[in-house]
Each structure stands twice: as C-alpha cells, then as structure tokens.
Amino acid sequence: MSNILELMPELEPEELHYVQSLVNDMSFAETQQFANIYRSRRRKPQEVLILTIIGFFLLAGLQRFYLGQIGMGLLYFFTGGLCFVGTILDLINHKRLTYEYNVKEAQTVKAMLRF
C-alpha cells in the first residue's frame, strides 16, 4: 500500500482521499507510474477559476472546453454563458467541476495501468 500524499502533495483533500482509495492495492512502482501519468492529465481548480473569469469577460465557455466538455462549451459560447448565469454558477462551483474531471481522469489512468 503506497501513500499518494508523498508522491502528489499538491492534491486537494477530497481528491487526495479518492486517489488514495484507487491506489491502495497498487505496488509502489505502480503508484509512481500512476502519479506521473495522472499529474500530467489532471486539472487544477485555480486554472479553471482563471479561465472562468476570462470567459466571463471575453469568451464564454472557455472553462468547459478546458475540462473536455465540448458540448457545454459550445452552448456557453453561443448563449453568452447561458446569459451569464451558467458562468456565474461555474465561478461558484469551479472546485466541483475540477474534481469531477479529475475523478474521471484518475479512473482512466488506473484502467490504463491495469492493461
């Protein structure tokens, strides 16, 4: 059982708990490989917040494109961030949006390592 905190101290507490549960059954070498791949694929809440702020003033939906939600990004783009209501909600919920994206990426990385 490897401690992911030693390899990835930058993780948010909720994300750290989830990722630790994913790597509990991995060896230290597998955990290191997981951490290297996951670190390159994960998104930081601060980056999503900055892109949401930029999107509020310039290009609505930028944060959704960054999180891989192309359909929502297009919807935000063509509707002005759903008349700014969706963009304001994204400003409030940027940590949740990032966490959901990172959970999917962590599951993908674990699946990749199992094959």
Image (cartoon, rainbow, N blue to C red):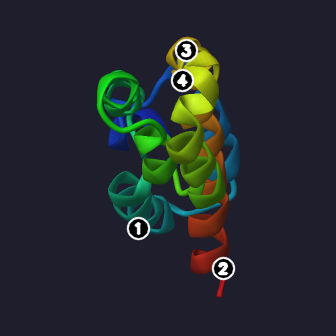
Instruction: Compute the Cα span from label 3 to label 1.
Output: 37 Å
**Disc 1 to disc 4, how far (Cα)?**
36 Å
Q: Which residue is mark 2?
A: 114
Measure the C-alpha gap from mark 3 to mark 2. 39 Å
Tell me the SS state at disc 4.
helix
Q: Which mark is residue 87?
A: 4
Which marked residue is nearer to the observer: mark 2 or mark 4? 4
Give the spatial CA distance, label 1 vs label 2. 12 Å
Q: Which mark is residue 90?
A: none
Identify which residue, 16 or 56, lies in the foreground.
56
Residue 32: in sight, yes or no?
A: yes
Residue matched to label 1 = 33
Locate residue 28 relative to residue 82 in the image: left or right: left
Quadrant in the rendering for residue 62? top left
Q: Position of residue 48 (x, y in %)?
A: 40, 32
Q: Does residue 102 show up?
A: no
Q: Which residue is mark 3?
A: 88
At 60% across and 23% down in the image, what residue appears?
Answer: 83
The amino acid type found where label 3 is placed reads: Ile
Label 3 with label 2: CB-CB less than 8 Å: no
> Label 4 near label 1: C-beta < 8 Å?
no
| Marks 3 and 1 in Cβ contact (< 8 Å) | no
Task: Give the mark, 1 or 2, whose residue is nearer the N terminus.
Answer: 1
Is tag 3's residue or tag 2's residue first in the polypeptide sequence? 3
Residue 80 at x, y percent in the picture: 52, 33
User: Mark 4 or mark 2, which is nearer the start of the sequence?
Assistant: 4
